[in-house]
Image (cartoon, helix red, strand yellow):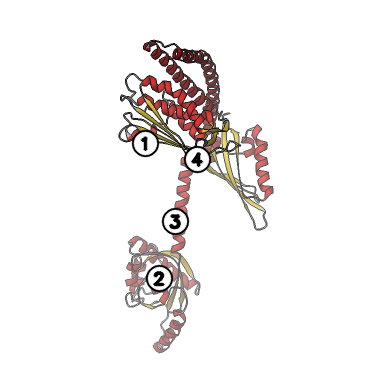
Amino acid sequence: MPKAGIFARMVESAPEPLVVFQPARIADPGAQAQGELGWNAILEHIPMPLVVGTLEEVPRLVFMNREYVRLFGYRREEVPTIAEWMPLAYPDPVYRAEIIGWWLKMLANSIAEPGLVRSREVRIRAKDGRDVDAILNAMVLEAHVLVAFQDITGRRQQELEREQSNTRRQLAADLAGVGFWEYDFETGLETQDTQIHRIYGVAEGGDFGVWENRVHPEDLGAALRSIDGALASGGNGQGMDFRIVRPDGAIRWIRSKFHIARDSGGKPLRLTGIEFDITGDREIRGALEQALARSERENEEKSRFLASVSHEIRTPLSALVSLANSMLLEAEGHPLPEVYSQHLESVRAGGQYLNLILSNLLDLSAIEGGNTAMHCRDFYIGDWAEDVAGILAPIAKARGVRLEWVLPADPEARFRTDQVRLTQIVLNLAHNAVKFSIKPNAVVSIGVSMEGGRLGISVEDQGPGIDPARIDGLFGEYAQGSPVPRGADRGIGLGLAIVKKNVELLGGSVRAGLAEPTGMKFVVELPPVDAGGAA
């Protein structure tokens, strides 16, 4: 049989001998042309890419429908022959040789089985440079080859993305130590990935055996009940924690999450799940719980110690302050030398200051221990301010500081809150202001106001102030905002922390800022507390 044209060149380059189909020539060219016109009209409206080629010595592409042009971009006048089409559609010479070999086999087989459709997947380079994945379906019809294409580029892209997603998921699962398993209810087949084998201590590729035999005996019942409950309830998801026993005897904690796939009638089909080792988390949580319990015990012991020590200190301290007060009252009727009076004032002021420190320590300990009980009642603001002024007066006098009080104009003004906590707030703010007022004849202003049922308190000093960047840290425990002036008590840094905690307990707010021209100003705002103790 003669070998001519492009098919001759194909056969000569083929890796094995091939039989070439040489179709008979049509005697009447006019009839052939008329037939082609009829076919063209039919094929043009088929909604899939189609092309028709001849089986001449120089095979031509005699028809391309609009879907073919839309998909690949080429028109018939651009690629009139198969010889011109091949390098454009298959630019890689190795792949092109593979395609040519397939065509030769297809044509040869069409002699033995004429009229059959031959198919294969191909990747064709479109005119705009895109690679189009398609299924090529070819059939020999007399002197022509009809080729239809099914575009599967989108499907291939989805498969690629799915494969990449699965790869990323597997990498993430391996990195996180997550294993996957599945159980098929119809076949009874259970499968596990390699990570599950690692979690359970089973050699990769080894026999996993029965899952129930690997669960800790004490946890098996609860684990099975969890699965059975999920199956019976009609739900789709569940989770559980249980222990396993590895072949080497090691006990590990496992967290399992599983999903139940059901048919339209609710019948379970598959059980799919993930598992990961949480032994480390369990150990950390156990250590934290032990540390928390130890800390709570230590706090209780500290609170008892502080209460005991403060009681032992406060009893003689109260007696000392009372004695100093009595002596000063006695001195009013029997004048003492000035130096003695100054000493008595110092004793009384020091006692009041020590009493304030003890109250702060006890209050902080109580708050940290969760004891935040409040005892709220109505009181006259004027009477309360007079009591507080009596406590502060000797402390301010000992420092050479003058206290200026500004009270509501209404002498009958009343407020409801925890009076003890309110007193502690003002004492701490005022004592702090007195301590930092180092100028001669310095003044500390204490303002009390009522507006809209809320109580406002302001304390302003004439001290050195503070770096604005450090204001936010003033209310921390043991915080020291500014260097303590020479001759002043350093304190322990609890005063402002107690102020903030008590203000928050009373449902209010406190803020600090710089005063003009120097010094600090603290502003407290408190809502009234109702009979139930709520602000």
Q: Position of residue 329 (x, y in %)?
A: 47, 15
Q: Mark 2 highlights which residue?
A: 71
* Disc 1 to disc 3, C-alpha distance: 63 Å
Q: Residues within 10 Å of mark 1 (few under 14, many from 20)?
A: some
Side (left or right) of 234 relative to 371:
right
Is 394 left, or right, of 206 in this rendering?
left
Measuring from the top left, give residue 439's x and y in whole percent: 31, 25
Determine the secondary structure under disc 2. Answer: helix
Disc 1 and disc 2 in contact, CB within 8 angstroms: no
Disc 1 or 2, which lies upstream in sequence? 2
Give the mark nearer the N terminus: 3 vs 2: 2
Q: What is the secondary structure assignment of the residue under circle 4?
A: strand
**Nearest the eye: 97 or 199:** 199
> Do the residues bearing badges 4 and 2 touch, measured as CB atoms within 8 Å?
no
Where is mark 4, residue-wise?
A: 454
* Mark 1 or mark 4, earlier in chain: 4
Q: Amino acid at mark 3?
A: Leu
Tell me the kind of residue under disc 2. Answer: Leu
Residue, disc 1: 513
Upstream in the sequence, badge 4 or badge 3?
3
Q: Which of the 4 image quarters holds residue 27?
A: bottom left
Spot the residue most to the front: 333
Which of the two marks, 1 or 2, is nearer to us in this view?
1
Q: How many marks?
A: 4
Q: Which residue is mark 3?
A: 160
Q: Quadrant of the N terminus?
A: bottom left
22 or 430: nearer the viewer: 430
Secondary structure at numbered mark 3 = helix
Q: Amino acid at mark 4?
A: Arg
The CA distance from mark 4 to mark 3 is: 68 Å
Q: Amino acid at mark 1?
A: Gly
